[in-house]
Image (cartoon, grey):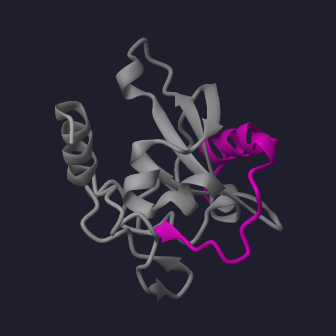
Amino acid sequence: MSRAWLLVTLCLAAMGCTKESEPHDSPALGEFSKPVRDSPGYFEACPVLDGSLDPDGGRGADAAAIRFTTGGPAAKSALADPAARPNGLNLQEPWGKGVLGSRVARDVVARSSCGRDVARRSWRVTIDDGSSSASLDTWLYLIRRADGWKVWGSY
């Protein structure tokens, strides 16, 4: 094994992305599931994949994210996946100033916490907090359901 390959393997193991923990094999907890065992702890809960749809290129995800961040409690509740509450999302006050970008959520945050399948089914929308600091912007994680996009996490 080359030194570079060993470093990559060790890095992935430290992030909880080893072959043993990659499948989302945690037991379901009602309407949301536990994060992958030994994950870095980005999320307290993950969306269940049953009833989820292909992200369809994120079509409509940005609009749902804006409605979620700018809406009041009723709008937020309608757009929240059951995993949103355990993940501590703000379901009360409006926040955010617009979308800076969006993409499929195949990033280390979603993948290492919730597994590859959840990451493939999720879409990440970057929300501008209104300040000049990019570090204060928020990534919203959404999953597409039959009744539309649902926000399940933020980072």
Answer with left or right where residue 143 lies relative to residue 45.
right
* 51 over 42 or under it: above or below: below
* 136 over 5 or under it: above or below: above
Observer-nearest of 104 and 47:
104
- For the N terminus, the quadrant is top left
Q: Is residue 149 magenta?
A: no
Can residue 86 be seen by looking at this rendering? yes
Q: Residue 35 placed where, x, y %?
A: 38, 68
Q: Residue furthest top?
A: 132
Q: Residue at x 36, y 63 (%)?
A: 19
- For the C terminus, the quadrant is top left
Q: Residue 3 placed where, x, y %?
A: 16, 33
* 137 over 77 or under it: above or below: above
The stretch in magenta equals 46-73
Can residue 99 be seen by looking at this rendering? no
Q: Residue at x 56, y 44 (%)?
A: 105
Q: Residue 98 placed where, x, y %?
A: 63, 27
Q: Is residue 51 magenta?
A: yes
Q: Residue at x 51, y 58 (%)?
A: 116
Observer-nearest of 100 and 115:
115
Q: Residue at x 49, y 54 (%)?
A: 153
